[in-house]
Every structure is written in C-alpha cells, then in structure tokens.
Image: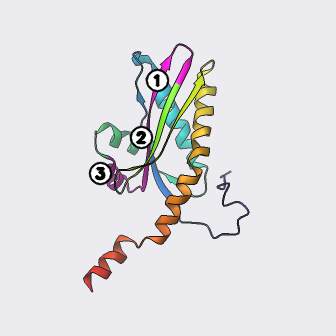
C-alpha cells in the first residue's frame, strides 16, 4: 500500500505531480570496508520507503548506483536519470553507534535543499537500517512537498523553449 504524504492527507488540496528522485549509494566513511553492506542496505531501505509515498517516483537502484559510481556531479546525474532530486549521504560507525548524514539535492542546480544527521545504536543491523530509512522518509516530507509545488509552478522546458522562440 502506498503512503500519502502527511500534509496531503485530508488537506483537500489537489495532488501535485510526483517528484522524481534517485537515491545514490551512501558512502561508507568507516575504516572498515566490510561496513559497505550497511551503507548499501540503508540506501536500499530508503528507496523502498520513498517508493511507498504517492508523490514520489524513485529511479531504479541499478541506474542510481551506476550514476553514483561514475563520479558525475548532481546536475549530470539528474539529467541522465531524468530526476528532479537526489538523496545522498554517508555512514560512519564507532563501536555500537552509527551516524548517518543525508542530503536532498536539487538536480537542476546541484544545491542542497535539506540536510540532517541521524544517529542510532546498532544492536541489530536490519532494525537500524529500517529505523534510519523511516526517519529520513519522514524528514523528507516537507522538502519533497516544496519541490512538487515548485515543479507545478515552474514552466516546463518545452514551454520555456516555445516562449523563447516567440
């Protein structure tokens, strides 16, 4: 079942066009290369969580991973994947604590729209990934609604091209 944005539920407002988004692989900043699985699993859970939101369309994991691995800047990734926004971040771990930094980036200009740090105790890797992904999805609600609203207000590139031709 897909989730409605909390702000949209019961608002009576017309739904916005979906925001297209790519979740890039999270960088593992720990000294232990074996922790890559945690960062990859976190990105996977985040994609799953965002795909459950009505107003969001998520780029395929394989496409996002390939674009992220190519070392392209945010604007080029956005063009290649035809997405409006990117989620990127990093994971650090010390003993039983994990710290995650996540950012929402506007793929049109490469600027950060939102950034937050999350920290959790890691007793169970899967629970920690689920909790962190859910926290990020909740935190992204307002920035994604703003993106959807601005997309509806901004003329499309085709409309701009027609206006420029006149």
Q: Earlier in the sequence, mark 1 or mark 3?
A: 3
- Helix, strand or loop for disc 1: strand
Q: Nearer the viewer, mark 1 or mark 3?
A: 1
Seen from the viewer's position, the closer of residues 59 and 39 is 39
Q: CA distance from mark 1 to mark 3?
A: 27 Å
- Helix, strand or loop for disc 2: loop
**Magenta range:** 74-98
Residue 154, image quadrant:
bottom left
At label 1, counting other C-alpha atoms closer than 10 Å, the crowd grade (few under 14, some 14-19, many 20 or more) is some
Q: Nearer the viewer, mark 1 or mark 2?
A: 1
Residue 79, image quadrant:
bottom left
Q: Earlier in the sequence, mark 3 or mark 2?
A: 2
Q: Looking at the image, which residue sits at the far bottom?
A: 166
Q: Is residue 3 above or below residue 92?
A: below
Q: CA distance from mark 1 to mark 2?
A: 16 Å
Asked whether, in this view, residue 3 is left or right of residue 59, the answer is: right
In the rendered image, residue 91 lying in the magenta stretch gets the answer: yes
Residue at 27% x, 86% y is 166
Q: Looking at the image, which residue sits at the far right?
A: 10
Residue linked to disc 2: 24
Q: CA distance from mark 3 to mark 2?
A: 13 Å
Residue linked to disc 1: 92
Residue linked to disc 3: 76
Residue 100 point in image, percent of width and height: 50, 30
Q: Earlier in the sequence, mark 1 or mark 2?
A: 2
């Amino acid at each position: 079942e897909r989730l409605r944005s909390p702000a949209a539920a019961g608002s009576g407002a017309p739904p916005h066009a979906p925001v297209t988004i790519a979740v890039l692989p999270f960088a593992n900043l720990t000294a232990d290369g074996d922790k890559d699985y945690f960062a990859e699993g976190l990105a996977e859970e985040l994609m799953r969580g965002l795909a459950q939101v009505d107003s969001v369309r998520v780029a395929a994991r394989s496409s996002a991973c390939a674009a992220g691995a190519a070392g392209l800047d945010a604007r080029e990734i956005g063009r290649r994947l035809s997405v409006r926004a990117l989620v990127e971040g990093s994971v650090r771990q010390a003993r039983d604590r994990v710290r995650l930094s996540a950012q929402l980036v506007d793929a049109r200009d490469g600027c950060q729209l939102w950034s937050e740090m999350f920290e959790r105790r890691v007793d169970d890797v899967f629970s920690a990934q689920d909790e962190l992904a859910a926290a990020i999805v909740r935190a992204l609600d307002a920035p994604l609604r703003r993106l959807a609203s601005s997309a509806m207000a901004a003329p499309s590139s085709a409309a701009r091209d027609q206006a420029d031709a006149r």
